[in-house]
Amino acid sequence: MSRIKKHSLYEQLSICFYFVSNSIELSTHKQGMSDKAEVRRVSEADYDVVMSIRSGVYGGYDYLPSMFKSLITQSHNKGYASIINGKFVAFCMVSKVDGGKTVVTRAGRVNKQYEGRGLYNALKLYLQKHVFSDGTISSHTVVYDDTNQSMMDKTSKGEFTLLMKRKVIGYRIDFDKMSVIAKRTHTTTNTRTLNEVDLITVFKSRSVCSTLFPQERIICNFVPYRLTERNIPLIFSEVSLIVGTGEPELSFITCGVYYRSENGHTFIIEVYGNNNFIREHLILHFQHALQYYPKEINILIMCKENAADKIDSEIKECQLSNMDVGFKTVFLVEKNIK
């Protein structure tokens, strides 16, 4: 049994974490009071208690409320919660990708009442001990934004290696304007919706991958994937759309994911390659989004830093207005486990 001490921000309060078999016990001592806590895997039935942990996560663009039930029932995803006296106070989802060789920690949150008490760190230590150590996992990846000071510090200290740095540009568009754009005709016949077979062809082409994905990763719904055929079924979903331009080889790909957040209807578009065709891609993405969203939509474009100005100029030709997202940069980092 190992013991880790963590100082609290509260006076006369000591917190100790104990790793015992398959759980973490947390004891807090204040004026003779003692609390017990454990970590356990959550299920679809835990939706309400997980959502009650915290609101306003990720600047209000949290995808977990609308995607929890679909994600938690997929075999490559597992959710874990820290529970104190029966109350859910911290949560993290773990996704295994790359054929089980990579774990992605995502959708993390801690109840505001318990911030600064080391609960999330204890939860991650539990995951390292009981989830990451099965012998098949070789790397741990995280996608985070520039408001996550803890992860930024860990990256600067070398605990994680920076793989990608993506600029975030926000827009807002109402239903009527989006409908008008969606009815426009493509100017290039080589822009089309991609299916799984198309993406297999892309991943098998060294020239395409080296051009579009020099870091050998594609991000969709805040999850980074290596360019392997095993990942393709995980990338596609009912609320995602992959659009490509180019013939015979693709020179531009966008990955769109649509969901409802606290800030309203939201979709994220990841951009890779020659962004001259961004407006044509918006037509297809909007046609898809209109199936789900009958109201105003918040759009978050994520792209290479040196492509941001060009993309912003192209999109403004569609008369979309900029909005403040609350964060400007997204980072993909990784560390080796073995």
Image: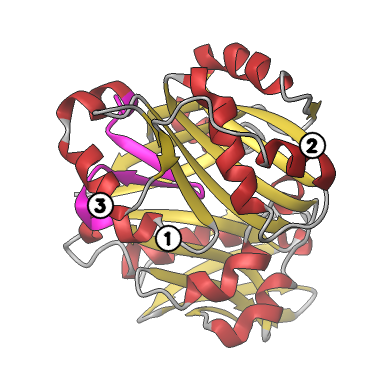
**Do callouts 1 and 3 mark residues in contact (Cβ within 8 Å)?**
no
Residue 292 rendering spot, x and y as whole percentages: 68, 61
In the rendered structure, find residue 125 and report the number of the disc placed on it: 1
Disc 3 target residue: 197
Comparing labels 1 and 3, the label whose residue is closer to the camera? 3
Residue 26 at least partly seen: no
| First of labels 3, 2 by sequence position | 2
**Do callouts 3 and 2 mark residues in contact (Cβ within 8 Å)?**
no
Magenta highlight range = 212-231
Disc 2 target residue: 172
Left or right of 95 in this view: 16: right
What amino acid type is highlighted by mark number 1? Leu
Callout 3 environment at 10 Å: few (<14), some (14 to 19), or many (20+)?
A: few
**Cα distance between the residues tagged 1 and 3:** 39 Å
Does the stretch in magenta take in 1? no
Callout 1 environment at 10 Å: few (<14), some (14 to 19), or many (20+)?
A: some
What amino acid type is highlighted by mark number 3? Val
Residue, x 56% and y 42% (percent of image)? 284
**Cα distance between the residues tagged 3 and 2:** 33 Å
Counting every numbered tag in the picture gives: 3
Front in this rendered view, residue 148 or 51: 51
Secondary element under disc 1, as helix, strand or loop, is helix
| First of labels 1, 3 by sequence position | 1
Front in this rendered view, residue 328 or 149: 328
| First of labels 1, 2 by sequence position | 1
